[in-house]
Image: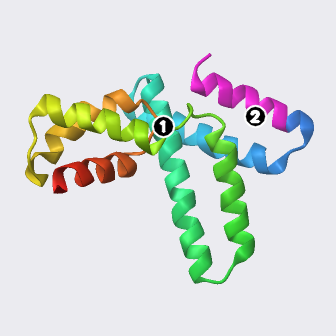
Amino acid sequence: MSTKEQLEAGLKEAMKAGDDLRKRTLRMALAAIRQAEIDGGKPLEESQMQLILQKEIKSRHEAITEAQRAHRPDLETAAKDEIGVLEGFLPRQLAPEELDVLARQAVAETGATSQKDMGQVMKVLMPRLQGRASGDQASQAVRRLLGN
């Protein structure tokens, strides 16, 4: 079952259960996926759908930061709850050690020695992550390795 199908099934369950948070969150995620399909003119691949979910989660993290600045714990809590719903539709996230192993392999394969080579390493690394780590996490791991 694709991520989109899982989201649609989750939406139906939320509607039957009267779970407004889950219903609202899944509708926003599905709308983002549908918009990307319309913009691209074709159905999305699984990895693209997972990237969209990661972007949605990233925007919620940004909303948490803004809510903290505005002293709005209600908005902060809502964003955290939405993140919890969305994370349930992503594959298990890599542990930092697992990410480091993959990053080391990518660095070794590309022969990267400095920060200038980071783009090459990221091109090799990102397809291997397949939604199991964010681009930010991957770039931090690569920076640590290339900074030494």
Residue 124 appears left or right of 102: left
Residue at the location (16% across, 32% down)?
108
What amino acid type should be assigned to the residue bearing mark 1? Answer: Leu
Q: How many marks?
A: 2
Give the magenta part as a residue range.
Answer: 1-14
In depth, the one of 52 and 145 nearer the eye is 145
* Quarter placement of the C terminus: bottom left
Q: Is residue 82 left or right of residue 23?
A: left
Q: Residues within 10 Å of mark 2 (few under 14, many from 20)?
A: many
Residue lying furthest top: 1
Disc 2 vs disc 1: which is toward the camera?
A: 1
Q: Residue at x 54, y 61 (%)?
A: 61
Q: Look at 77% across and 43% down and name the residue there.
A: 23
Q: Quadrant of residue 51?
A: top left
Q: Residue furthest right?
A: 17
Q: Residue 44, position in %: x, y?
A: 45, 25
User: Label for residue 94?
Assistant: 1
